[in-house]
Amino acid sequence: MEFESGSESSGLMDIEAVQRALNRSRASVYRYANTDPNHLNPPYDSKRLNPEFRTNKDDVLMFHPSEVARFAKDVLKIKQVTIEVREVPKTQIQEVLEAILLELQSIHQLLKTRS
């Protein structure tokens, strides 16, 4: 079984990516997830699929590929687990932000040398 990440630039997996990786229904993935309507970030549970830390209850559930692999191997007893993280191509926004950052860094260096 292969796990493919890349739905976000952070390398985390959304519900759809976990669903494809585990070959389970969307409802099953939600049942596996360690969530609680009364607690935004419940404590780690080794028998559940633990999402990444959320700051708001409306944040999308995201899962680290290693956590999905651990869950598949330890809980679902899937024998062969492979994690493959694919880098998502940069968007135009990311490229512009990187160019702005480089420009700001060069301005900063110039100002440092003049002081």
Image (cartoon, rainbow, N blue to C red):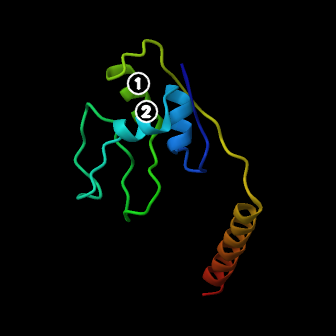
Q: Residue at x 43, y 27 (%)?
A: 69
In the image, is 96 to the left or to the right of 59? right
- In the picture, residue 94 is in which quadrant? bottom right
Q: Residue at x 38, y 20 (%)?
A: 73
How far from the left and from the top, in percent, is residue 108?
Answer: 63, 78
Three-letter code, disc 2? Val
The answer to whether residue 13 is visible is no
Q: Which residue is mark 1?
A: 72
In the image, is 85 to the left or to the right of 92? left
Q: Which residue is mark 2?
A: 68
Q: Residue at x 28, y 56 (%)?
A: 37
SS type, badge 1? helix
The C terminus, quarter of image? bottom right
Three-letter code, disc 1? Ala
The answer to whether residue 18 is visible is yes
In the image, is 40 to the left or to the right of 106? left
Q: Residue furthest right?
A: 92
In the image, is 93 to the left or to the right of 78? right
Is there a contact, CB below 8 Å, between mark 2 and mark 1? Answer: yes
How far from the left and from the top, in percent, is residue 68?
Answer: 43, 32
- In the picture, residue 92 is in which quadrant? bottom right
**2 lies above or below 42:** above
**3 lies above or below 7:** above
Residue 18 or residue 64, whichever sits in front:
18
Q: Residue at x 30, y 43 (%)?
A: 34
**114 lies above or below 3:** below
Counting other residues with Cα less than 10 Å from the Cα at mark 2, is it few (<14), some (14-19), or many (20 or more)?
many
Q: Which of the labelled discs sits on residue 45, or is there none?
A: none
How far from the left and from the top, in percent, is residue 20?
Answer: 56, 31
Q: Residue furthest bottom?
A: 115
The N terminus, quarter of image? top right
